[in-house]
């Protein structure tokens, strides 16, 4: 499911332009990396770090969905603020997990 989501968002990013393309590419990369980590965690059930990484990547995906939704409803993101916003989402998830 995560691989299909990555393919879907990558395809959707290719029809977008500007910062919307970057938003969708970031979520496609996140979905693809989450799929790889999830497959690794299934193959290596003793690796706790893989399970925590899968959870954190899912949290990043979920929060990034909200950021994209707010962007469509009026949050001002442009080419210079999309990547920092994604970094803030990642730091927020990391700070919550390491808390």
Image (cartoon, rainbow, N blue to C red):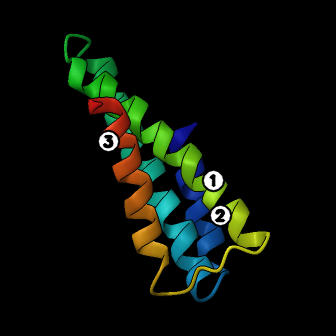
Quadrant of the image containing the C terminus: top left
Check disc 1 and report the residue beneath it: 65
Q: Residue at x 51, y 58 (%)?
A: 27
Q: Residue at x 45, y 86 (%)?
A: 80
Asked if residue 50 lies left or right of residue 24, the reply is: left
Quadrant of the image containing the N terminus: top right
Determine crowd level at label 2: few under 14, some 14-19, many 20+ residues with C-alpha closer than 10 A: some
The answer to whether residue 27 is visible is: yes
Check disc 2 and report the residue beneath it: 68
The total number of labels drawn is 3
Tag 2–tag 3 contact (CB < 8 Å) = no
Residue 34 percent location from the top left of the image: 40, 41
Q: In the depicted view, which residue is nearer to us: 54 or 67?
A: 67
Nearest to viewer (mark 2 / mark 3):
3
**SS state under label 2:** helix
Residue 48 percent location from the top left of the image: 23, 17
Determine crowd level at label 3: few under 14, some 14-19, many 20+ residues with C-alpha closer than 10 A: some
Question: Mark 1 or mark 3, which is nearer the start of the sequence?
Answer: 1
Q: Which mark is residue 94?
A: 3
Tag 1–tag 2 contact (CB < 8 Å) = yes
Distance (Cα) linking label 2 and label 3: 20 Å
Q: In the depicted view, which residue is nearer to us: 87 or 24?
A: 87
Q: Residue at x 20, y 10 (%)?
A: 46
Distance (Cα) linking label 3 and label 1: 17 Å
Distance (Cα) linking label 1 and label 2: 5 Å
């Amino acid at each position: 499911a995560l691989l299909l989501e990555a393919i879907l968002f990558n395809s959707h990013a290719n029809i977008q332009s500007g910062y919307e393309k970057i938003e969708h590419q970031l979520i496609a990369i996140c979905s693809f990396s989450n799929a790889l980590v999830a497959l690794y965690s299934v193959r290596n059930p003793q690796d706790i770090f893989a399970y925590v990484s899968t959870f954190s990547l899912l949290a990043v995906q979920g929060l990034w969905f909200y950021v994209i939704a707010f962007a469509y409803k009026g949050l001002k993101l442009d080419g210079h603020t999309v990547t920092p916003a994604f970094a803030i989402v990642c730091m927020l998830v990391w700070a919550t997990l390491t808390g």
